[in-house]
Amino acid sequence: MNRILALFAFVVFAVFLGILAVKVPSPDLVIVITLTVILVAYDFITSCSDKKD
């Protein structure tokens, strides 16, 4: 259940930033948004992996 909610939050965040990138097509802003989405995706993948504590 936590993975589904995390995936939903990631998709909503990416869509929000995608809309921002389309409405304000500044090259610098698009680069920062792309980097941000990559970092959030990396965090999502690493935090959702099976860890046995």
Image: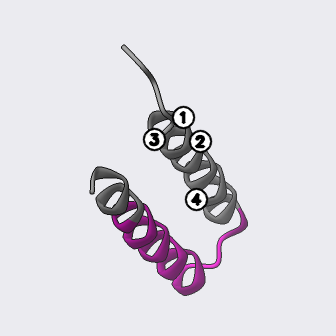
- The answer to whether residue 42 is left or right of residue 16 is right
Q: Tag on residue 6? A: none
Q: Position of residue 2 (x, y in %)?
A: 28, 51
Residue occupying image coordinates x 68% and y 59%: 28
Crowdedness near tag 3: few (<14), some (14–19) or many (≥20) residues, C-alpha within 10 Å: few
Q: Amino acid at mark 3?
A: Cys
| Precedes in sequence: disc 1 or disc 4 | 4
Q: Which residue is mark 4?
A: 33
Q: Which residue is found at the position 72% from the left and 66% from the top? A: 27
Q: Nearer the viewer, mark 4 or mark 2?
A: 2
In the rendered structure, which disc, 4 or 2, sits on the residue that comes first in sequence?
4
Crowding at dot 1, Cα within 10 Å, few <14 / some 14-19 / many 20+, comes out as few
The residue range painted magenta reads 8-27
Residue 42: image tag? 2
Task: Give the residue pinned by disc 3.
Answer: 48
The residue located at (59%, 84%) in the rendering is 22
Residue 2 position (above or below residue 9): above
Disc with the residue nearer the chain's start (4 vs 3): 4
Which callout, 3 or 2, points to the residue nearer the camera? Answer: 3
Height in image: 44 above or below 37? above
Disc nearest the viewer among 2 and 1:
1
Q: What's the distance in space between the residues labelled 3 and 1, CA to CA?
A: 6 Å
Q: What amino acid is at disc 2?
A: Tyr
Residue at the far bottom in the pictured view: 23
**Label 3's element?**
loop
Give the residue number, with chain letter if any, for mark 1: 46
Q: Main secondary structure of the magenta part?
A: helix
Frontmost residue, 22 versus 11:
11
Q: Is residue 34 above or below residue 42?
A: below
Instruction: Name the kind of residue labelled 4 in the image.
Output: Ile
Q: Quadrant of residue 52?
A: top left
